[in-house]
Amino acid sequence: MIIAYQAQAEEEWTIDRYETLSYARVSGEVVHGDSLNFFIGSRENCETVYNNFTFVTYEKPGDIYQLEGKNIPIKINGEDFTAKVQAVNPFLIGFRVTFSLGEFPVKEYIHRLNNFYKKENKYEIEIVDGIDFKAAKYFDITTNNWKLDKLVPSVLKANKLCETISHLDS
């Protein structure tokens, strides 16, 4: 008898705080070192979420730090967007590049993102070529995806954690 099964990556969320921020983070399925992050600031009364993501790369172009502050073309589930490079940091034998997707009202945004995820049944970000930008020059793996089945409870838990920071710091 042959028993076949499909290995599934567990959807691991980290929920914690750092100084005046709380956050919920989930690791990528293609590259585990890539993360999708939801930061909530107590200084904004825990009402705003900053959504960013990271890509790890082992490409080492001499001008990689020049990406900081630039808007890079991406696709989310095949739709065109841009993401602003917040930081480029050394990581292992390569770099970790942090991209910002923006800041949004917490509850409205996570419910909208959750509905999008349920409709599409995936959340995939691809770094794509643009004007004067070749993705393969900077990134050896240009696509990652994340499981978001636990998005709403994870971000709401981070939101509650943020509210405790506000009370402790006020």
Image (spheres, grey):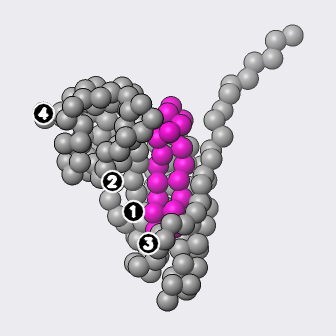
Magenta-colored span: 22-41
In the picture of the structure, the residue carrying the numbered disc 4 is 132
* Mark 4 residue element: loop
Horizontally, residue 143 falls left or right of residue 150, namely left
In the rendering, which numbered label is found on residue 50?
A: 1
* Mark 1 residue element: strand
Labels 1 & 2 near each other (Cβ < 8 A): yes
In the picture of the structure, the residue carrying the numbered disc 3 is 41
Mark 2 or mark 4, earlier in chain: 2
Q: Residue at x 59, y 55 (%)?
A: 14
In the rendering, which numbered label is found on residue 1?
A: none
Q: Pinpoint residue 168: horizontal percent, then vertical percent.
A: 56, 84
> Is most of the magenta stretch helix, strand or loop?
strand
**Which amino acid type corresponds to the residue marked 3 in the rendered image?**
Gly
Mark 1 or mark 4, earlier in chain: 1
Q: Pinpoint residue 81: horizontal percent, then vertical percent.
A: 27, 45
Asked whether residue 101 is drawn in magenta, I would say: no
In the picture of the structure, the residue carrying the numbered disc 2 is 100
Q: Pinpoint residue 111: horizontal percent, then vertical percent.
A: 49, 61
**Which amino acid type corresponds to the residue marked 4 in the rendered image?**
Asp
Q: What is the C-alpha distance between the residues marked 2 and 4?
A: 20 Å
Q: What is the C-alpha distance between the residues marked 3 and 2?
A: 15 Å
Mark 1 or mark 3, earlier in chain: 3
Q: What is the C-alpha distance between the residues marked 1 and 4?
A: 28 Å
Of the pair 4 and 25, the residue shown nearer to us: 25
Labels 3 & 2 near each other (Cβ < 8 A): no
**Which amino acid type corresponds to the residue marked 1 in the rendered image?**
Tyr
